[in-house]
Structures are given as C-alpha cells and as structure tokens.
C-alpha cells in the first residue's frame, strides 16, 4: 500500500501514472498519438488518460480512482501500443524505400 | 498526398482500390477491392473449444496475433503495394469493443503511414453492399442474419431502414448457444462454426419437436425458444424421446420459418420482388431453401452468397468503403473511434439514389 500511496496525488486523491515512449522520429510519435487517441476509455468514470507528443516522445498520463481500474487501462494501452509499433515496423513504405 | 486520390477528387475516372479491415467478432479478415473486383480476401477464425463461446479479450488477443500476417497476405495475394491503394476502410461498429479497437488501430496506423484516407464502415452496411455486389440484386429486401444481428432491411430515401429485427438475441446466437448445451456422444464442435455443424446434424433429424413460435408483428424473439429447447433437450435426450439430430432439425425449421415470415411481410409492405440473404447464418442452405419456396410462391427472386462473402470478411468492408469513398464520405482520424452499438439506419447512404 505504501507504494500506491506514494503515487497518489494529494490534492485530488487520485492515483497517477505516467509513461514516456520514445520513437525514432517525431513522425512516428505523431502517428502513434493519432492512432491511439480516438477511442474513449470503455468505462464511464473513475479514470482519465491524456496523450501528448513532444519531439519524438509519446507521453501518456493516467489519473484513476482505483489501482484495479488503472491496471486494466495501462495493460490494454500497452497491448495497443505494441500493435501500433509492430505495424509501423512492418508496413512503413516510406522507410523501406 | 497520393496521386490517385487527387485524380478521384478532380472527378476524372480512374480505378479505385480500397483495402478493408474487419474484426468485429471472431473472424479477422482483410480484403482488397478494385472497382467491384475482389483482389484478395484472407481471413482467420478464432475457434474456441466445444461448449465455449468467444470472449472479447481472448478474441482481441487472437486478432492481435494474426492481423499483420493477414495484412501481408492480402497485399501479396492482390499483388499490390501500399502506393496502389486509394483508401483504408475498417469496421467502425457494431461489434465487440476489444476486437474492434485492435483492427481500427492497425487501419489508422497504415492509413497514416501510406497517406490514405480512412473510411469508417458500418458492419451491417458492409454485408448489404457485398451481397449487392456479388449477386447483382438491384433493390432487394435484405434479411441480415448472423451471430450478432437479425434484421429485415429495405432501402428507402438514403437509409437502409430496419423493418423488423430481433427483440432479444440474434438467431445465430440462439443456434450457437444451443450447440454449447447439447451433448450427444461429445459436444458440438465450433469448427468451422456451431451453426454449420447444427445444419449437418439437422439433415439426419426425422421427428419434429414442437417449439414456441415467437413472431411479434415485424419482430422476432429467440431467447424464449433457446430456454425452452435447452430444457427440452435435457429431458428428451436422457429419456430417448428424440435425438439431438431431431432437435437440430426442429430448431432450424422453427427459427427459419419465423425469419421467412417477417421477410415476406416486409416484401409485401415494400412491393419488393427481390430478397437478399446476408450474414453468417445466410450460408445455411436450409434457410436458403425455405426462403426460395416463399419467393417462388410470390414470383420473387432470391439472392444469396456462399461462405466466402456471407460470413464476415474484409472485402465486404472494402466494398462499403469503396462506395463511401466514391461518394466523398471519408472519416477523419479524430472521428475514427469505434462503437459497439451502431444501427444500420444511422448511416446516410450517400451512394444510392
């Protein structure tokens, strides 16, 4: 519990989690941002997720009421991220030319 | 921006190539269409053990594992490079959330990598447009029957209007769930699909077991029939009053009669002389036969396709995407979110008069 408490933002009482993903260039980071942004979180409340790009880094910041909800969202985001990265590696026609 | 897209925009006739991604349920399919010609249409099915249905997260995991291989196959079979493609169509909904997201992610990513517009397709409209393309039916009354949907549809004033539908579960879901509960020597296999295996068993049925017949006006209901037959199955099979084959036969005869009845009523209402059957259950030959009898009596024509195009596939999404693209309907990235609920009549059919 101590670890969870350490991550808790004391003003809002919410759990926060952040992730930085490096990409080869700003182009890939922006493509990932636009592929991963459109779908809303499946549950109505209890969690929010912000995506942004700065240079070649995709940053994600979560804010959640419960660790359980946060884990589900982060897990599925990581699955989605790997699929997008794999797709870029296999099908970027500009990179292979 | 891609040259062929600009040619389209300037109104000069050119061939249009659309790639379509489908994965709203347990099939993942990617198809490529060039002006009505199917260039490739590979597909994989997530098959669960007998007695089990498919859960959203497991299905999404299956799709993630194979989607890039299927995409490679689709391009190679068509003999095309990404530069030859004019637009990327994908299923926006309806369907299971997690599998839909998986497929949309890859579609969005390749659309950006290749610099092509995205086309968010309504899955049901995909079935209708593929059926129209393959059968050349002009303006049919459509019976759309699958594991997730049961609708009678007719086109009017830029919408595919729903004349009748299920008020609870889809007819294919009723068949699938029946297959999960009955045990003969072993449970009914999900390979290639429970419905196909029920169809084969039904051919050996000799005795009709009376079941509830639940047509409610233009709508149908299947959940009560399912509960009834589940209970009847336990009692009658253990006491040898009938065989599992008899139950398969009786269930098919009952639910298909209901579907033929509401289709006929919609035809009478619209003055239609064509019926098109689409969706996974649409490749059931007994359903096609029963619908054929009704059509013959009315002097109408029946159109149906085989399992390649009836069952969910990528080409059907490409075909609906092709129609959208040609009529100028594209989907912005920020509007490309998937939706589990997306009614057939929500789509403005901008490509028909």
Image (cartoon, coloured by chain):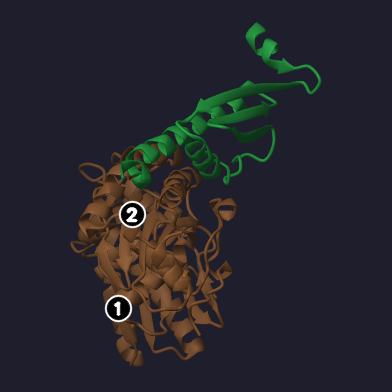
Residue B90 placement (x, y as % from top left): 44, 56
Above/below status of A61 relative to B133: above
Which quadrant holds residue B167? Answer: bottom right
Chain with green colouring: A
| Mark with earlier residue (2, 1) | 2
Q: Furthest-front residue in view?
A: A97
The residue singled out by tag 1 in the image is B135
Chain with brown colouring: B
Disc 1 chain ID? B
Disc 2 chain ID? B
Residue found 29% across the figure and 39% down from its top:
B49
- Could you say which disc has been placed on residue B82 in the image? 2
Residue A52 placement (x, y as % from top left): 62, 35
| Secondary element at tag 1 | helix
Residue B40 placement (x, y as % from top left): 25, 60
Looking at the image, is mark 2 or mark 1 nearer the viewer? 2
* Front residue of this view, candidates B236 and B42: B42
Q: Is residue B181 visible?
A: no
């Amino acid at each position: 519990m101590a670890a969870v408490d350490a991550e808790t933002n004391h003003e809002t009482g919410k759990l926060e989690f952040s992730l930085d993903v490096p990409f080869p260039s700003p182009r890939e980071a922006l493509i990932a941002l636009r592929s991963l942004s459109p779908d809303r979180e499946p549950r109505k409340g209890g969690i929010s997720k912000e995506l942004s790009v700065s240079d070649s880094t995709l940053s994600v910041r979560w804010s959640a009421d419960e660790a359980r909800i946060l884990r589900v969202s982060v897990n599925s985001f990581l699955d989605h991220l790997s699929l997008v990265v794999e797709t870029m590696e296999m099908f970027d026609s500009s990179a292979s030319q | 921006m891609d040259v062929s897209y600009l040619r389209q925009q300037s109104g000069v006739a050119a061939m249009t190539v659309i790639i379509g991604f489908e994965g709203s349920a347990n099939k993942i399919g990617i198809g490529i269409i060039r002006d009505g010609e199917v260039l490739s249409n590979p597909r994989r099915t997530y098959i669960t053990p007998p007695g089990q249905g498919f859960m959203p997260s497991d299905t999404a995991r299956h799709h993630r594992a194979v989607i890039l291989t299927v995409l490679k196959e689709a391009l190679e079979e068509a003999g095309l490079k990404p530069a030859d493609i004019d637009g990327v169509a994908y299923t926006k909904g309806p369907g299971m959330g997690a599998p839909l997201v998986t497929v949309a992610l890859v579609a969005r990513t390749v659309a950006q990598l290749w610099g092509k517009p995205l086309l968010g397709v309504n899955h049901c409209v995909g079935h209708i447009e593929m059926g129209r393309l393959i059968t050349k039916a002009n303006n049919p009354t459509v019976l759309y029957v699958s594991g997730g949907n049961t609708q009678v549809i007719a086109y009017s004033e830029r919408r595919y209007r729903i004349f009748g539908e299920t008020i609870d579960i889809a007819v294919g879901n009723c068949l699938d769930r029946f297959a999960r509960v009955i045990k003969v020597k072993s449970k009914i296999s999900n390979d290639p699909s429970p419905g196909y295996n029920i169809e084969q068993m039904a051919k050996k049925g000799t005795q009709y077991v009376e079941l509830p017949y639940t047509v409610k006006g233009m709508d149908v209901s299947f959940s009560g029939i399912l509960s009834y037959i589940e209970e009847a199955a336990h009692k009658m099979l253990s006491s040898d009053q009938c065989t599992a084959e008899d139950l398969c036969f009786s269930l098919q005869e009952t639910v298909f009669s209901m579907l033929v009845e509401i289709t006929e009523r919609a035809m009478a209402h619209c003055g239609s002389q064509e019926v098109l059957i689409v969706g996974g259950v649409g490749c059931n030959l007994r359903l096609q036969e029963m619908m054929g009898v009704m059509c013959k009596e009315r002097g109408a024509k029946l159109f149906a396709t085989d399992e390649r195009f009836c069952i969910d596939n990528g080409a059907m999404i490409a075909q609906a995407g092709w129609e959208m693209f040609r009529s100028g309907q594209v989907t912005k990235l920020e509007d490309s979110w998937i939706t589990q609920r997306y009614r057939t009549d929500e789509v403005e059919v901008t490509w028909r008069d």
